[in-house]
Amino acid sequence: MTTRVILVRHGARYDYANPDWAQRAEDLGLFSRDPPLSELGFRQAEQAADHVEKRLSKLGETADVILVSPYLRVIQTAQPLARRLGAPMCIEEGLAETHHFTNRLPEARERFAYFPEIDPSYEPLNVIEPDTMENGKPAELYPESYMRRNIEFGRSLTTHFQGKTVVCYSHAASVCLVAGLLGIPFPEDLSFTFAPCGVFELELGPKTGHRWTMVSAGHSNTTHVTENDDATSPWGYTGPYRLLWNEMIAEEIEAAKQSKADAWSSRKTSRNSTL
């Protein structure tokens, strides 16, 4: 039984292509951290959908579920694939952007009015609890809480969707979700990045020794995207953020080893007690 996760980053952002948009939105009392895609972003989204659809067809699979970050640009990026596959989009807080502000985005039922592919009945695997204040609003602490959330969300994906094919749409920083599933640190040379509409594919099953393995990377999008801009570009963790992640994942690996050792010791003790 194989579990497959395909992770796609959103396309080019409207606010990056139009720098005055954020201030104009704030002047109107709107949430400026939820911009739409740019015209280029919409084209990239269609190309990414075509790429993923062809990949699934080659595998003889379809998406059992499409999970999307609650942010508009991500929903817009996922919509072309949802239409092509006739699959619902499920808004998942576990895939939300860094510095996520709780209660600032429209709920799933409100998004449904404009994106009928959304399943408003879906219950997220992860619900983000704010642990800091930013601009007077409750938010998730970055990077610590965000990184921890992605590690926990990776566990939820693995257990909840065992044997399924899951397509996730998220943000550049969710490259740590990939690293968390693989159980690896980030390299110093900034080679582990996430391109706009880049596509990571990971597989877990008998062929991989029941360990998450990367089938294809999303560091570049040149296999399927024909046009990029300089504003929305490949992104990865650097400096102290990279070091913090590497410390976290080392602790996770050590904890997993200890858990296996404890389980083995418990089984051994149980067998001996029955002799």
Image (cartoon, helix red, strand yellow):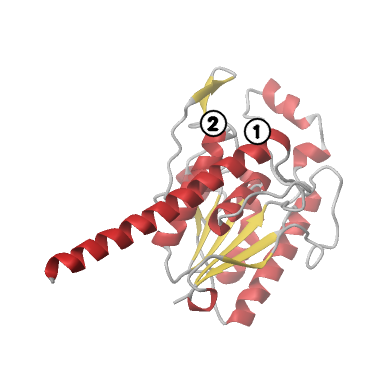
User: Which quadrant of the view contains residue 48?
Assistant: bottom right
The answer to whether any part of residue 249 appears in the image is: yes
Q: Which residue is drawn at 49% across and 74% down?
A: 205
User: What secondary structure is found at the residue carrying circle 2?
Assistant: loop
The image shows residue 164 at horizontal and vertical percentages of 46, 70
Instruction: Provide residue 6's location: percent of width, then percent of height.
Output: 59, 64
x, y percentage for residue 188?
75, 46
Q: Type of residue at label 2?
A: Phe
Front in this rendered view, residue 152 or 94: 152
**Residue hosting label 1:** 33
Q: Residue furthest left?
A: 274
In this rendering, the count of numbered labels is: 2
Q: Alpha-carbon distance for marks 2 and 1?
A: 9 Å
Q: Do the residues labelled 2 and 1 touch (CB within 8 Å)?
A: yes
One can see residue 97 in this view: no
Q: How crowded is mark 2: few (under 14 residues within 10 Å), some or many (20 or more)?
A: many
37, above or below 220, in the image: above
Which of the pair 228/133 is nearer the observer? 133
| The C terminus - image quarter | bottom left
Q: Name the residue under label 2.
A: 101
Residue 78 higher or lower than 208, as above or below: above
Left or right: 72 as drawn, with respect to 92:
right
Q: Which of 111 and 153 is in front in this view?
A: 153
Q: In this view, does 273 lie to the left or right of 73?
A: left
Measuring from the top left, give residue 89's x and y in whole percent. Answer: 52, 57
Q: What is the quadrant of residue 213 in the picture?
A: bottom right
The quadrant of the picture occupied by the N terminus is bottom left
Q: Of label 2 and label 1, which has the lower sequence position?
A: 1
Sort mark 1 into few (<14), some (14-19) or many (20+) by Cα contacts within 10 Å.
some
Amino acid found under the numbered disc labelled 1 = Arg
Question: Does 96 appear above or below 267?
Answer: above
